Amino acid sequence: VSYVDGTYFVKLVAKNGEAVYDSLQKAIDAATPGDTITLLGDVAEDVTVGKNLTIDGDDNDYTGKMTISKSINLTVEDVNFVEGNVIKGKGTGTSGDYTFKNCSFFSESDAVYAVEIRGSGSIVIEDCTSDGYFGFLQVPSTNNSTSIKNVTIKNAGYAIKVDYSNGVALENVTITDSTY
């Protein structure tokens, strides 16, 4: 609840069908696997995703850590990550398919990767940009395939770091002002 000019109001930040929510996490928690959650405005919160979903940013900003808590199929599209990132860590399941389309990642802090996925499955990244992260993509464990298409990465330490994969495809990828 916010108070502006003598008025209290609730900021609604996400919707799923006709249902609206004042936090992205509440929308995720209430969703049924396969649903699409759409951002209604800029979001600044850490969230955990543990079910098959699509998150449609509708070209809004997301600031925070999006943690994948288990093996799922997740699509993230049209999200502007501002000091935000996506991570699937150790011990959260071994498979899952992850797709990122039309996303931008911007950070003035070079402390994290924009996207870090551990476990098998596939990773598809298309039509995205990244500027200022320690690295854009880290895949530190075996996965089935990684496809990166129409992506621009600049000002990164590690642009793309894939330790083990059964296949990596890069198409129309531009990397500038990056160390590795």
Image (cartoon, rainbow, N blue to C red):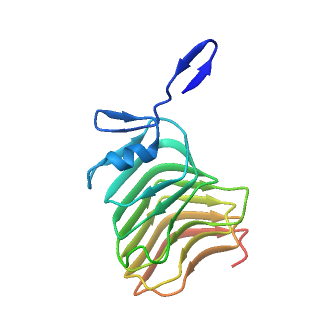
State the residue in front, 134 or 89: 89
State the residue in front, 21 or 174: 21
Q: How many marks?
A: 0
- Asked whether, in this view, residue 88 is left or right of residue 174, the answer is left
Residue 92 sits in which quadrant? bottom left
Residue 4 pos. (x, y %): 62, 18
Residue at image coords 29%, 33%: 18
Classify 119 as above or below 82. below
Residue 135 pos. (x, y %): 64, 70
State the residue in front, 113 or 93: 93
Residue at image coords 70%, 73%: 157
Classify 20 as above or below 69. above
Residue 23 pos. (x, y %): 47, 40
- Asked whether, in this view, residue 23 is left or right of residue 80, the answer is left
- Asked whether, in this view, residue 146 is left or right of residue 128, the answer is left
Residue 5 sits in which quadrant? top right
